Amino acid sequence: MMIPRRSPILTALVACALVTGCGGSASSSSSASSEASSSTVNTGESGAPASPNNPASSSSQIGFEGIPIEAGPPLAPNTTGTGAVDGITCGPTEQLAYHIHAHLAVYADGTPTALPGGIGIPGSATVETTEGPVAAGGQCIYWLHTHAPDGVIHVESPTERVYTLGNFFDEWHQPLNARQVAGASGKVTAVVNGRPWTGTPRAIPLLPHAVIQLDVGTPGVPFQHISWSGTQL
């Protein structure tokens, strides 16, 4: 699998993290993804596109995956354990039979927070490289994980299965419900691909190229689009 703009330094770090590849494409078609998304969200209005010049969206730094590094402090520490969670195990290598990517952005009272790199890679540490921050080291790697603090959730599973945001937070050992998102507390408003999500945020499916935004408390932030174009994700 190809990682966008991979350098020799990054290659060594990823290998150290027991990773065989971060890029790739979804096993499902984009049309199937759109149909699945439409069946689980209500119609709503999209907000302004994400921009490095918009402080509510992202930092100006582009990470090694081609996605902007998220602005703000970490949403919560990386508290991933090593035991099986929701039937998801932590193994020595990635499982690439089903390989897709989704994006998560969380705002606390209108302030951006960052999803830490290394969630799902217990024992890893995020280090700075010439291509941006990336998680290095680690004891094993779960089927749901992050490599960088850019909000990209990797789903790399031995079988094709629809995982949920709740599965990801369970694996992270952080709470997710209508009043709390990891370290942020308050009423949670969810938007998926620009459309309001009216159910529990735990049930949001991690579909190919899903863009998920959670606003905790007030004020809310207009939906921030993420472009997957040219990322090889």
Image: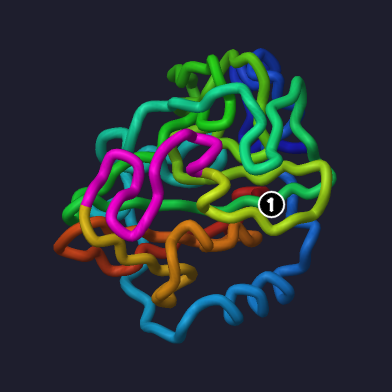
Q: Which residue is mark 1?
A: 100
Tell me the crowding category of disc 1: few under 14, some 14 to 19, or many 20 or more residues within 10 angstroms, Cα based: many
Q: Is residue 116 depicted above or below 187 in this figure? A: above
Residue 217: name its quadrant. Answer: bottom left
Q: Position of residue 110 (x, y in %)?
A: 19, 56
**Three-letter amino acid code at disc 1?**
Ile
Depth check: give the residue in front, 36 or 182.
182
Figure colour scheme: rainbow
Give the position of the N terminus as an image quadrant. Answer: top right
Q: Nearer the viewer, residue 103 or 24?
A: 103
Percent position of residue 27, x then y = 80, 57
Q: Residue at x 62, y 36 (%)?
A: 85
The vertical placement of 194 against 174, above or below, is below
Which range of residues does the magenta coloring cover? 169-185
Q: Residue at x 36, y 27 (%)?
A: 77
Q: Is residue 218 left or right of residue 233?
A: left
Left or right placement of residue 43 versus residue 107 in this view: right
- Give me the residue at 15% from left, 63% from top: 219
201 lies above or below 36: above
